Amino acid sequence: MKFASGSKIYTFLKMQGQGLLKSYAQVFFSDNLVLAIIIAIVSFFNPLAGICGMGSVVLTHLIAWFGGFNKQKIASGLYGFNSLLTGMALGSAYEPSTGLFIIVSFGTLLCFMITLAIEGIFYKYGLSFLSLPFLFSTWTLILATRHLSGLDLTPGSTFLMNKLYALGGAPLVESYNWFFNLELPEPIILYFRAIGAIFFQNYLFAGLLIVVGLLYYSRIAFSLSILGFASAWLYYKLLGGNMADLSLGYIGFNFILTAIAAGGFFTVASPWSYLWVILLSTLTSIFTTAALSMLNQWQLPVYSLPFNMVVLLFVYVLKLRERNHDKPALVNIQLFSPEKNLYSRLNYTYRFGHPTGIYISLPFRGKWTVTQAHDGSITHKDAWRHAWDFEITDDEGKTYTNKGLTCEDYYCYGKPALAPADGYVVEVADGIDDNAIGNKNQQNNWGNTVIIKHAEGIYSKLSHLKKGTIKVQKGSWIKQGDPIGLVGNSGNSPYPHLHFQIQAYPYIGSTTLLHPLSGYLKWGANTPEYIPHGIPNHGEIVESIQPQSFITSAFHYTSGQKVNFLFSAPNQPDYKDYWIIENDMYNQTWISEPSSGSKAGFTYIGQVFYFLWYQGKTDTPLYYFALAHYRIIPVVIPGLSLHDKFPLHMMKRNFMFFLNDFIAPFFSFINADYKQYHQKLTSHFTRPEAILESEALVKLVGKLIKKYKFYSYLKHDGLAEVRVESGNGVKIINFSPSDEA
């Protein structure tokens, strides 16, 4: 029977299938389907445990679906993985019977309810429920079933050989014995068996298969699993203990999963996170020993209790830091891959430069000169050192015309001062007269001033404004670029200039705060350099970007918009296709290519267009489009060049990327650069046209190994064509003049 791809039945079955598989991968904090399939196969090495585990997941998702709970959490496996562990724990502990399936069914319901309850409690603290629902539900069921005669405990490995023979005959028994009797060092055997024991399969071969899947999913997670295991092994050796005396499940659940969670999932993998894994392995050992002593009184297994306690404690403590937030950095947007978390963090830091999320622009239009910068020689000292004075200069470097004896002689006098970012006006001081040239008013040091609150702890101040020209009122909301007032010569100002600073408090005399300015041009002899974020220095000529409407309209996308195009490539027929602009409840926006399933997320910061991420194949029109237009400023200036970096997981991967992942937390020998050149700008009777040339360059230890070259042809009515040149010929994306179907 076939179902239409848009039908409710198809949607239901697809969600259930995805959720079922991803529940297996979620145990390792992953959404990788290859790892999920391997674990699902391994789970059936003990058939009853496999059946109970899979059945628990299916039942959980049915309850969640018909109960009206979050569909995304069903499809991602977040609701299912605790039920998987609960079902497998029960299936591996008891013999098959009607009573077992009754207990598994109600245990699944209990586990799901506990999952929802803990999720609701932990949400306000920004914490994950981890495997606590599995623990609480399994312990409850163990205590509740002790005196039930309808349940029989499994004899464990006593009849394992008989089961293996029944399943696969003599070859399977011989294979098992061969693996079991491999002459490997004890720690290696223990490591593989502990990995398998996470899914209640205490076999070397089971662990080996899961490790292969883990290695395919994440090199960082694999290395962390070894580091966590080795650190715990060393701890027991130093203190005269024997790690082999512990249950295999305790080792897998606690030392290995703790290392992966703390070292690369909840934190960004780095030397600091690896150091913490070593430290936390010792803490986990202590918690494990203590938990054994405590739970033995009730004859309850420890399972993953130490893992939950240590990871939750660690993550919560990191959230309380006041400084050193990158040692290690917590993951803000979870991508379910240590590599993706790392590469995205490095890329975000490079592209946006500061963690506040507030982008402060220059507070004026046109070219201005920094006449006093940070740590200036005149007034920008000590706690007030992070500030700028701006003036306008001519070709000779002079700030005035005539003899410069009056305020009106100065080029900047009377020019508009603009809001550097959105915010509320929290302070206005007006009514102070301009000084005569050379004089100062030190009683009213800052002169006529406006302070704007952009976020908690982020304020901007514009001072020495002209009396009576301030256009905003205290308490009003203003947008970036709105006029504030005119530049004057009030306060401690012998010559007209605009004083500008960022500060942490809303007071006129507040000390300054080090904070970059974003998205401006720094002029050299003839051409400018685009500065995405930086601190203007003394003597630099800077200019805010003035958008050109035909550029902004070409890259202006709204939810629901359809973009039609014709794609041409060598050795294949041309075809028509389309993109759809989509967004979600979190206001994330992306371009979707339904024919390939690819998506490319984008945003606007100020007037600048950014692609943020890409999901899908690396040979689609959308992929080439995202590479070509990774960052677009809303102006074309012939001779201007831009530079940016791609996250490595966005590039087409090969074996060298695989190797790079192992050392990426410490050093990367692969870089992916984006370069853009403004080639041409023409105007025919107010009908501008431009050509943007861009490159995507992949370098191995500085040597170019992959190159894409793009030419984007922009016309007055939008983007006309993108030409893609790479090693396998020329591809062309030709856009339709309208978005009509």
Image (cartoon, rainbow, N blue to C red):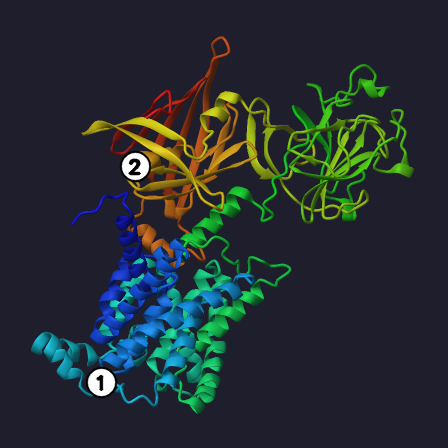
Q: Residue at x 13, y 83 (%)?
A: 162
Distance between the alpha carbons at the discs numbered 2 and 1: 52 Å
Q: Quadrant of residue 417?
A: top right
The residue shown at (48%, 85%) is 290
Q: Residue furthest left?
A: 170
Along the viewing direction, whichever of 458 and 438 lies nearer the viewer: 458
> What residue is disc 1 on?
157
The image quadrant where one finds the C terminus is top left
Q: Quadrant of residue 497?
A: top right
Query: Residue 183 appears at what percent x and percent y?
Result: 22, 80
472 above or below 23?
A: above
Which disc, if any, is residue 620? 2
Q: Residue at x 68, y 26 (%)?
A: 368
Q: Is residue 539 left or right of residue 66?
A: right
Is 390 above or below relative to 651? above
Numbered disc 2: secondary structure: loop
Whether residue 256 is visible: no
Q: Which of the 4 quarters of the picture holds residue 429?
A: top right
Q: Amino acid at mark 2?
A: Thr
Point out residue 79 in the picture as x, y percentages from the top left corner.
38, 63
Give the residue at x 90% y 29%: 439
Residue toward you, 729 or 597: 597
